[in-house]
Amino acid sequence: MTAPAKSEQDRVVIFDTTLRDGEQCPGATMTHEEKLEVAELLDQMGVDIIEAGFPIASEGDFAAVREIAKRTRNAVVCGLSRASFKDIDRCAEAIEPAEKKRIHTFISTSPVHMKYKLQKEPHEVYEMVIAQVTRARSYTNDVEWSCEDGTRTEPDFLCRCVEAAINAGATTINIPDTVGYTVPEEYFALIKMVRDRVPNSDRARFSAHCHDDLGMAVANSLAGVRAGIRQIECTINGIGERAGNASLEEVVMAMKVRNDVLPYWTNIDSTLLTRASKLVAAATSFPVQYNKAIVGRNAFAHESGIHQDGMLKHTQTYEIMTPESVGVKQSSLVMGKHSGRHAFVHKLQEMGYQLAGNQLEDAFVRFKALADRKKHVYDEDLEALVDEEIAHAQNRVKLVSLTVIAGTMGPQSATATLDIDGALPGARGDAGHRRAGRGVGAACRERPLGDRQGCRSGYARCFRQGLSRRAQ
């Protein structure tokens, strides 16, 4: 049965800003070569727009954007600029070699930003919106305009600015939640309001750029999609200013896994997500948190005995996507103090060991004891446990303890405790009355048990032979 054709109206464009907003994360600066490597992988995995940097920021940023523009073959290469003409001109110069290029220009529109940062009145900002988009449009037909701090902008002024930007030539309108302040229902209502009230909204694609200060960047972005947005601005591993941006891997897999309630699609090859995550983590020296959704080390790892048992019976009991779908080779059952017997046996079988009965029980008991003392139980630890069990498996009779009392005065006795096939019968002998008793005397073939006077071998020989033979 063939899959239904994908509608272009349901396609969500992925705008990756790892190399711009992501690199603005304190301590996440990348070298020139690292930026080129990341950009190459983004292009390979199907990212639609690569925001390569902020060309006016430094000579290094300009050089990186320009080189990426030369090398990129599939994605649109985008540069960021403020509203000043100097910024826009520098950005246009940097992206000039690209086969497909975009200028992304922005200005603040919220009351707090206009008053304290720009120190301008709303009517001045409105005129700057028209001027900056017009200037950018003189270099390329692909212009994106952003209203910085859009979610805290007064609705009437926001709609006026959006309409003016579209009339001036903007083809993409970005409504960012710059400080991560909004919630999904509120963002949905905002996007719907703007698209309904702005008369020329059908002439532009709307975009979401959400920050994660309250941990809702992905949820807000997806709420925006439901309201009509068709571009999401995001970063690999969710890196970015302060608490970061919407995570590209989470956005993509949310729409892929829950396509029943989010019937949208992207061009991203999800099997490259883990590779991209590791590359960016290495380039920025920002480790990915272990429990990070999709690409974290524990995303497909299970330690709980209940979960491991379910996974061994059917993977869908505890996994909603396959590890292969995001570029992970396979799920892992982590051996620890919460692991159960089913997972322990499965792990040993994977390692080539077959234990049963007392051998398995003893090995499992020792494994649990080790796991209580050690945070990570490695394969080498399990090998040591099993090898020790196998090494002693052929010893059917084991001497557990031995007590000998001998002297020239008083009775002599010997007490031995033996483990025979797991049972612990005791053996006691009294040389003064029974020739070292049942445990010793039974081994003596010289005289019947208890015949002290008739034993020609003497006590010492009888005692030594009895112990020796009994232990065999």
Image: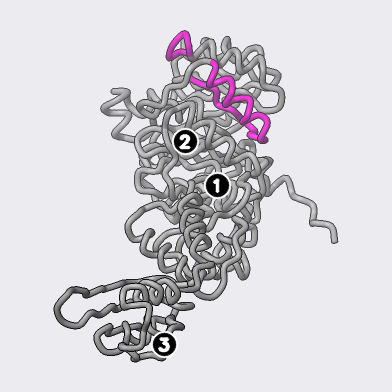
Q: Distance between the residues labelled 2 and 3?
A: 118 Å
- Whether residue 333 is visible to the viewer of this picture, yes or no, is yes
Sequence order check, earlier mark of 2 and 1: 2
Identify which amino acid the numbered label 3 is placed on: Arg
Q: Distance between the residues labelled 3 and 1?
A: 89 Å
Pointer 2 with pointer 1, Cβ within 8 A: no
Q: Around disc 3, counting alpha carbons within 10 Å, would you say few (fewer than 14), some (14 to 19), or many (20 or more)?
A: some
Q: Is mark 3 on a helix, strand or loop?
A: loop
Q: Considering only vertical position in the picture, is 204 above or below 227?
A: above
| Residue 447 numbered mark, or none | 3
Left/right placement of residue 311 relative to residue 190 reads right
| Residue 251 numbered mark, or none | 1
Identify which amino acid the numbered label 2 is placed on: Arg
Left/right placement of residue 18 relative to residue 119 reads right
Identify which amino acid the numbered label 1 is placed on: Val
| Quarter containing the N terminus | bottom right
Q: Considering only vertical position in the picture, is 439 above or below 226?
A: below
Q: Percent position (x, y) of residue 123?
A: 38, 27
Of circles 2 and 3, the one toward us is 3
Which residue is found at the position 44% from the left and 26% from the top?
A: 23
Q: Is mark 2 on a helix, strand or loop?
A: helix
Pointer 3 with pointer 1, Cβ within 8 A: no
User: What is the span of residues highlighted in magenta in the rendered image?
Assistant: 33-60
